[in-house]
Image: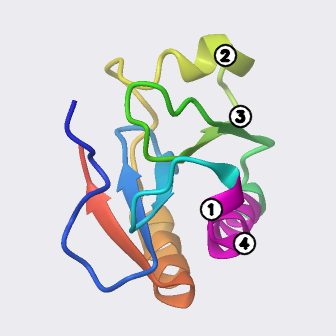
Amino acid sequence: MRDPFSVPTNKTLVALCGARKGYIMLAPSQAVESYRDCPNELFTAARAWAARLESFGSPRVYWVTLSEEVRHLHIHLFPRWEGDTLKGIPLFETRNEPNQPAWTPQVKELLREWAARFNVEVIETA
């Protein structure tokens, strides 16, 4: 499988935005396969995005790291919103299904501000 994070950029990090409001996959812009080689900026930016989602009403933001299919270490940041009936892994497994909570202009603006602050190249995948 092609590394979806290998995009031409001078930014430190790359975020792929999925269909679900607030859901991103965050990775270093240079391929990293181990935590010992992972830049601290990844965790700082991830923590900041999770905090922004919580301040916008997400009662829980899951962090999932499954870098098997794509060896480039990345973090899925997956918000659970009020009204979600599933929790944990079952909710995460629905991330590509239709009828996800839509990205609103307000959350897109939060994303733009966050990306500028943390030097993140944002790529919309949905």
Label 3: which secondary element = loop
* Residue 89: image tag: 2
Comes first in the chain, label 3 or label 2: 3
Q: Nearer the viewer, mark 4 or mark 2?
A: 4
- The magenta-colored residue range is 36-52
* Residue 68: image tag: none
Residue 67 vertical placement versus 116 (above, below): above
Residue at the disc numbered 3: 82
- Which residue lies most toward the right here? 59
Find residue 13 and report its horizontal and vertical position in percent.
Answer: 46, 71
Find residue 93 and report its horizontal and vertical position in percent.
Answer: 52, 15
Label 4: which secondary element = helix
Magenta stretch containing residue 123, yes or no?
Answer: no
Residue 102 vertical placement versus 99 (above, below): below
Residue at the disc numbered 1: 37
Looking at the image, do the residues carrying marks 2 and 1 touch, with CB atoms under 8 Å apart?
no
Find residue 112 and report its horizontal and vertical position in percent.
Answer: 43, 78
Q: Nearer the viewer, mark 4 or mark 3?
A: 4
Q: Amino acid at mark 2?
A: Ile
Picture quarter with the N terminus: top left
> Is the residue marked by circle 2 packed among few (<14), some (14-19), or many (20+) residues within 10 Å?
few
Label 2: which secondary element = helix
Picture quarter with the C terminus: top left
State the separation of the CA atoms marked 2 and 1: 27 Å
> Is the residue marked by circle 3 packed among few (<14), some (14-19), or many (20+) residues within 10 Å?
few
Q: Is residue 96 visible?
A: yes
Looking at the image, do the residues carrying marks 3 and 2 touch, with CB atoms under 8 Å apart?
no
